[in-house]
Image (cartoon, rainbow, N blue to C red):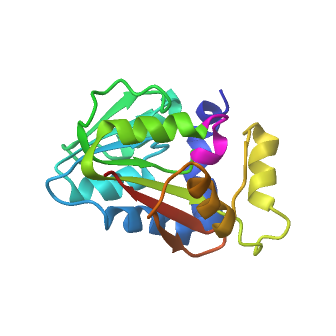
Amino acid sequence: MFWNKISPVYDLFENVYNRKVYKGTGIKVAEFIDKNDSVLECACGTGAITEEIAKKCRQVLATDFAEGMLKRASKKCRKYANASFRQEDITDIKCEDESFDKAVAGNVIHLLPEPEKALNELLRVVRPGGKVIIPTYINMARDSSGFAVKFIEKLGAEFKRQFDIDSYKKFFEDKGFKDVGFYVVDGRMPCAIAVITKK
């Protein structure tokens, strides 16, 4: 699996190519986390966002489909007693309904053939009044060659879609989500963070 293969060098690539956004996204996501929150994170990767969430919340369950990524995340976050790790499929989350205050899924929506399945699952496991927080890299045409996307695709990643800020907003609108908040972490490859409050 591609994500297992790339896990040993993923942090290095992100920090060399897009450090400001890579670090800044976790910090921005953590602004939506409260100290008493129970948080589910899907597609945690190597734990860049997990680390920032763990500093703020009561507990975080960080999940990923790739074992290699989970190992890296677990090692990175070993000093946080409130963080646990588990292999999980974002489109079929093995958690009870309404069992978390917040759910986070970073940089995964654009990789999924049926992203609505993931959105429905994230909303299912969050309590009413809770938030689903979805950071996704967007193309703001600063990297006109699309170097990062081309490089990662060449290594074997499969992008199902790419977004700019307008198409990212339209994506949620087309899925029937209204009153979504959007926040951009700016940098070489910016990240747009969608925040959905469950009614």
- Would you say residue 76 sits in the magenta stretch? no
On screen, 122 above or below 66? below
On screen, 79 above or below 173? above
Q: Nearer the viewer, residue 14 or 136?
A: 136
Q: Quadrant of residue 75?
A: top left
- Would you say residue 113 sits in the magenta stretch? yes
Magenta stretch: give its range.
109-114
In-image side of 79 versus 118 (left or right):
left
Q: Residue at x 66, y 72 (%)?
A: 188
Q: How many marks?
A: 0
On screen, 184 above or below 55? below
Q: Nearer the viewer, residue 177 or 92?
A: 177
Whether residue 189 can be seen here: no
In-image side of 64 versus 32 (left or right):
right
Q: Position of residue 111 (x, y in %)?
A: 65, 41
Q: Residue at x 50, y 50 (%)?
A: 106
Q: Quadrant of residue 29?
A: bottom left
Location of the N terminus by quadrant is top right
Q: Position of residue 69 (x, y in %)?
A: 50, 37
Q: Position of residue 115 (x, y in %)?
A: 59, 39
Q: Nearer the viewer, residue 59 or 131?
A: 131
In-image side of 60 versus 88 (left or right):
left
Whether residue 160 can be seen here: yes
Q: Residue at x 83, y 70 (%)?
A: 144
Q: Residue at x 71, y 66 (%)?
A: 139
Q: Residue furthest right?
A: 145
Q: Position of residue 113 (x, y in %)?
A: 67, 34
